[in-house]
Image (cartoon, rainbow, N blue to C red):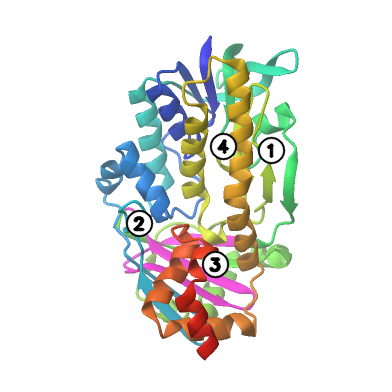
């Protein structure tokens, strides 16, 4: 019998397994895929995510993969350009955008080093119950072998369409319809920092990643998905040309080195993140539009939250249940503001009030840097609206 079974070994599950194993628990980490394997992703790690990699002793491993550091961010819309530095979180101001076939094996490897048992090619087909409590999982291997494993806690880190969440009956407590679809590819010979561009109905993001490449993403309203997908490459290039003409010009002398990837299935929800014998982390607990590139960072934060709440209480059923309730309540409290602000961006509207606001802060570099810090989670909205900002708005 295991103390913890974690289902899903990517950026939520692997850190959860690592932290639980480091706490002295017997951990089984299951993954349907076989690593290394790529995954749809915006790649970007905000400063809080980088800080956690540093805390876990894994940041140097990311740096060693030739993933370039990012220390600048810019945003352009409606004739306004903001450019700034990245404010530090726990001493970390440099960010990164590693490919998932690089990042995920590093995280899973750290879980194994901590003592977790890692099995790839395993699909969870059911849950084991003791009364109304989840007590393990039913597994099918790639070879068709079926068996069960038991644990005091089953953690679903198996993504937006989590089998653990479905099988445990995790209720959805906040939900909104899909708002954008996105297509992206990788370009060689395209220097970039973390670049964001917006016009009504379109959003473009770019950032450097591994192998000397730059990721360039284009976002469209979800209502246009059926049309965009008929000729996604043309729609992608046209969106960049009309939304980020300077970037488009630089791309004309670069080379697209991979096919176009995309999705029209960006669900938006927050689920109840714990119950009797189970918990959810990462996209299984909380998924929102990728336009804010917060998925990996949020997964890291949730893994650390769950481990901190459980602490040494795993073997005490009453204390474990209380820890799960605290974790679920804390997750909703911490991420609801990010969820709502992300969906505001995903509306792909540029109201005059926002343009006026951006023009006002553009003259004050401290305010610009703090504005970007709210996007990364370094600064809360309440902290951003300080006396200096209120004075600037009053004078505008």
Which is closer to the viewer, label 1 or label 3?
1
Are circles 2 and 3 on residues that touch, CB within 8 Å?
no
Q: Position of residue 70 (x, y in %)?
A: 32, 61
Magenta residues span 182-210
Is residue 80 placed above or below 190 in the rendered structure? below
Sequence-first tag of 2 and 3 = 2
Circle 2 residue: 95
Is residue 374 placed above or below 149 in the rendered structure? below
Circle 4 residue: 281
Sequence-first tag of 1 and 4 = 1
Q: What whole-number distance in Å separates the C-alpha atoms at marks 2 and 1?
A: 30 Å
Residue drawn at x 34%, y 51% is 90
Are circles 2 and 1 on residues that touch, CB within 8 Å?
no
Circle 1 residue: 272
Is residue 365 placed above or below 89 in the rendered structure? below
**Observer-nearest of 308 and 265:** 308
**Observer-nearest of 76 and 120:** 76
What is the chief secondary structure element of the magenta stretch?
strand
Task: Report the residue that reaches farthest toward the bottom.
Answer: 396
> Which element carries disc 4, helix, strand or loop?
loop
**Observer-nearest of 66 and 173:** 173
Label 2 CA crowd tier, 10 Å (few <14, some 14–19, many 20+): many
Sequence-first tag of 3 and 4 = 3
> Which element carries disc 2, helix, strand or loop?
loop
Q: What whole-number distance in Å separates the C-alpha atoms at marks 1 and 4?
A: 10 Å
> Which element carries disc 1, helix, strand or loop?
loop
Circle 3 residue: 218
Q: What whole-number distance in Å separates the C-alpha atoms at marks 3 and 4?
A: 27 Å
Are circles 1 and 3 on residues that touch, CB within 8 Å?
no
């Amino acid at each position: 019998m295991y103390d913890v079974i974690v289902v899903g070994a990517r950026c939520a599950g692997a850190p959860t397994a690592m932290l639980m194993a480091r706490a002295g628990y017997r951990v089984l980490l299951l993954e349907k895929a076989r690593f290394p394997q790529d995954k749809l992703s915006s790649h970007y790690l905000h400063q809080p995510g980088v800080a956690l990699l540093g805390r876990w002793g894994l940041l140097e491993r990311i740096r060693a993969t030739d993933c370039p550091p990012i220390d600048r961010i810019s945003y352009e819309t409606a004739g306004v350009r903001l450019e700034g530095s990245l404010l530090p979180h726990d001493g970390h101001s440099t960010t990164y955008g590693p490919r998932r076939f690089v990042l995920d094996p590093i995280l899973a490897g750290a879980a194994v080093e901590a003592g977790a048992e890692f099995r790839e090619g395993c699909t969870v087909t059911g849950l084991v119950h003791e009364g109304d409590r989840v007590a393990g999982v039913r597994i099918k291997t790639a070879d068709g072998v079926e068996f069960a494993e038991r644990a005091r806690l089953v953690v679903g880190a198996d993504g937006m369409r989590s089998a653990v969440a479905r099988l445990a009956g995790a209720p959805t407590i906040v939900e909104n319809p899909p708002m954008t679809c996105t297509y992206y590819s990788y370009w060689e010979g395209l220097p970039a920092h973390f670049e964001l561009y917006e016009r009504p109905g379109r959003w473009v993001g770019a950032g450097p990643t591994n192998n000397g490449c730059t990721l360039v993403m284009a976002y469209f309203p979800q209502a246009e998905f059926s049309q965009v997908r008929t000729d996604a490459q043309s729609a992608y290039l046209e969106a960049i040309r009309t939304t980020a003409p300077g970037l488009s010009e630089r791309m004309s002398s670069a080379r697209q080195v991979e096919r176009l990837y995309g999705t029209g299935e960006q669900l938006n929800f927050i689920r109840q993140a714990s119950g009797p014998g189970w918990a959810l982390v990462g996209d299984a607990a909380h998924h929102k539009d990728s336009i804010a590139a917060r998925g990996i960072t949020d997964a890291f934060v949730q893994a650390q939250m769950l481990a901190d709440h459980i602490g040494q209480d795993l073997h005490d059923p009453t204390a474990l249940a209380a820890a799960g309730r605290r974790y679920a309540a804390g997750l909703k409290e911490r991420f609801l503001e990010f969820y709502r602000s992300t969906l505001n961006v995903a509306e792909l509207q540029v109201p005059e009030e926002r343009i006026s606001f951006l023009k006002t802060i553009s003259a004050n570099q401290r305010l610009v840097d703090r504005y970007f810090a709210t996007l990364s989670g370094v600064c809360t909205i309440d902290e951003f609206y300080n006396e200096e900002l209120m004075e600037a708005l009053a004078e505008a």
